[in-house]
Amino acid sequence: MSAALVRTRDLAKIYRVGGAAGGVEIRALDGVSVEVARGEFTAVMGPSGSGKSTFMNLVGCLDRPTSGGYWLDGRDVAALSDDELAALRNRTIGFVFQNFNLLGRASALENVELPLVYAGVRARERRRRALEMLERVGLAERAAHLPAQLSGGQQQRVAIARALVMRPLLVLADEPTGALDSHTSLEIMALLQSLNREGLTVLLVTHEPEVARFARRILRFRDGRVIADEANARVGDAARLLAAHGEPA
Amino acid sequence: MSAIALLRVAMRSLAANKLRSALTMLGIVIGVAAVIVMLAVGAGARARVEEQIRSLGSNLLLVVSGATTAGGVRLGFGSNPTLTEEDAAAITREVPGALAAPALRGSAQIVWGNQNWSTAVFGVTPDYFEVREWPLAAGRPFDAADMAGAAKVCLLGQTVVRQLFGGADPLDQVIRVRRVPCTVIGVLEAKGQSLMGTDQDDLVLMPISTARKRVLGAPAQARQRSVGTIWVRVGEGRDMKQVEEEVRALLRQRHRLQPGQDDDFSIRNLEEVAAAQEASSRVLALLLAAVASVSLVVGGIGIMNIMLVSVTERTREIGLRRAVGARTRDILGQFLVEAVTLSLIGGLAGIALGVGAALAVGHIAGWRILFAPEAIALAAVFAGAVGVFFGWYPARRAARLDPVEALRFE
C-alpha cells in the first residue's frame, strides 16, 4: 500500500474573533490538500500569518481542524479521542521547537526520557534508549548536564534526541534554527539531513531560504493556502558545507 | 506515568521553590497541629474524668445535710446536721436498689511516735466500703461488733500512711486521734484526686459509734445520731434520677417538710458533676477544632493559590508534555500529586509540631495528654484531603490547557 504518511483534504481552521454575533472570522487555514510520502524532507515556507504554523499544529495533532480531513499513516485523525491523539503524538510524531522547550530542572538524559515516561517504558529501558539517542546526536558525555549548562546548539540536539527517542515516523521541526547562529544552524540541518537519509520523514517550518534549501521539497503558504508546491532542484548538503567552512575561529 | 515518577517530579518542583513551598505549607502545619493538640487534650480530659468517676464509684448519690442561718449568716450545706443514721437506714430499707452509708466528718491531729499529721476523720458504717467501692490494700474492715462496742480501731488512707509511717508497716500500730489511741486494722487502696481536686486518700476511717462517742465529741453530739453526709449507691438497672426523687421524697417525709418548704438537705448526682467537667473540656476542644478548621481552610486556599501560580509559570512545560504524549489525566495527576505532596509534608510537620505543643500544654497546664494513633492518622488523612480538594481546581486547569496555546505561552 502506497498511502501517504500525511494526507490532508480541504483542511481548514477558522477562528472567530470578537462577539458571537458580530465577530470577525479569521481563516488561518483555508482548504489545504497536501500529501507527504514516507522519507520526504519537506520545508513549509511562508511569511508570518500565512498559516504554516496552524498547518503544523494540525499535522502534529496538537489541534483539531474546523473542517476537512487529515489522515496520518492512513488513520483518520478526526475520529480519535484526546487520549488517542496523545498516544499518537507520543509514538508517531517527534517535535522540535525553535526555543528547544527543554525542562530546565531535568538533565539532558531525563529530558530525552520524557516521551518514554509517557509511553510507560520501564526505567532501565528508558535510560538505555535515551542514552543511545544522546549518543546518536553526539552528546552522550553531556547526559547529566542541565539545559542551562549546554550551548544553544547542544540544547537543540538534546531536543532532537527527545523527538527521536520513540522512533517516530514523522519529525515536525518548527523553526529549529531560529534561535541559533548560522554555524550551529548548519550543524542542526546536517543532523536532520542525515536522519532523513536514514528514512525519517521530516517536515520543517521555516521562513529562511538558507534553511529551506536543505529540503528536497518546498511548500509555500500564503493567506492560509498553499500557493506553491515544488521540488527543490538544488538540495544543499549541510554536512559538506560544514566541512568546507571548517570550525569557526 | 508511575506514582514514583510523579512523586519525583513533584518533589523536584517543590524543591525548586523551597521558601515558597514552606510558606505554603504553614497553614496546613498550624491546622494539623491544632487538630493533634485538640484530640490529645480532649482524649486526656475524657480519660481523667472517666477515671475520677471510677474512683468515686459510679452510680453514686451524695446527700448533704442542710444549711443553718445564724443571725443572717448562712453557713452552707452540712452546717446544720439535719440527716441522721436512721435516715440512711430508711433509704436502704425503703428505696429499692439503694444502699446508703452515713458518714460523720471531723478533722483531727493524729500522732504516731514522733510523727503527726492533720487529716479528715470519718465515722462510717461497714456498708461504706461497699457503697464507695473501696477495697482494702491490707488488713480488715471493721465489723458489727466493732460498731456495737465503739471499738478504738481505724483504717488509714494511703496519704496518711505515707505521711505518718513513711516506709513502716502501719498494721496493728496504735495511733492517737485527738489523743484517743486507736489500733490500725486496715489500709485502704489509693483512690487519687476527686473531681474537685482534693486528695481522697488523706483520711482516717473509724466506726461511726467510735467517732461520735470517743473522738469527735461534743459538737457532733449536739443532736444524737446526726450525720453530715449520706452516700447512696444506686443498684444496677435503676435510673439515677428516679432513685434521687425517691430519696428526696423519703427524706422530706421523714423530716416532716410541708409542700412548698425548701429541702433541708441537698442531693448531688456525682455523674452529673463529672459530666459538667467533661463538657467544659469539650468546649475547649471545640474551640481548638474551630481554629484547626479555619487554619486548614486558609492553608488549603494557600495551596490552591500557589498551585495556580505554578500552573501559570509552567504553561510551556505543560504544552511540551502534552506534545510528547502526556494525556490530560497525566497532567492532572502531576499537579494533584504536587498539591497533595505539599499538604502531606505540611501535615507531617504539623503532627510533629502538634505532638510537641500538646506535650508542652500538658506540662505547663498540668493536664493529662493522650495521643491516639488513629487520631494522628486522621490528621494526616485530613491534610491529604485538603491537598486533593484545593489542588483539584488548579490541576484541572493545567490539564485543560490547550497544547497549542500552552506551547506559544511566553
Image (cartoon, rainbow, N blue to C red):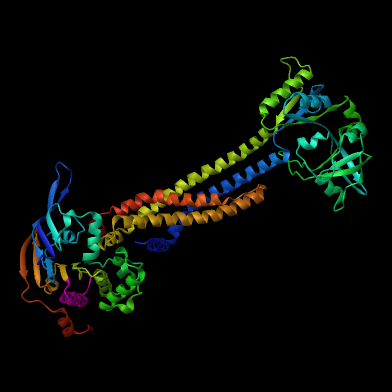
Q: How many marks?
A: 0
Q: What residue do we see at 55% from left, 44% from top?
A: B288
Q: Is residue A100 visible?
A: yes
Residue B337 coordinates in the image, percent (x, y): 39, 56
Q: Is residue A197 magenta?
A: yes
Left or right relative to B24: residue B335: left
Residue A74 coordinates in the image, percent (x, y): 14, 62
Q: What residue do we see at 31% from left, 75% from top?
A: A131
Residue A210 coordinates in the image, percent (x, y): 13, 73
| Residue range corresponding to the magenta coloring | A179-200
Image: B228 above or below B340: above
The picture quadrant where one finds residue A194 is bottom left
Residue A48 coordinates in the image, percent (x, y): 14, 61
Q: Provide the major secondary structure of the magenta segment.
A: helix
The picture quadrant where one finds residue B146 is top right
- In the picture, the quarter occupied by the N terminus of chain A is bottom left
Q: Is residue A137 visible?
A: no
Image: B75 above or below A30: above
Image: B109 above or below B353: above
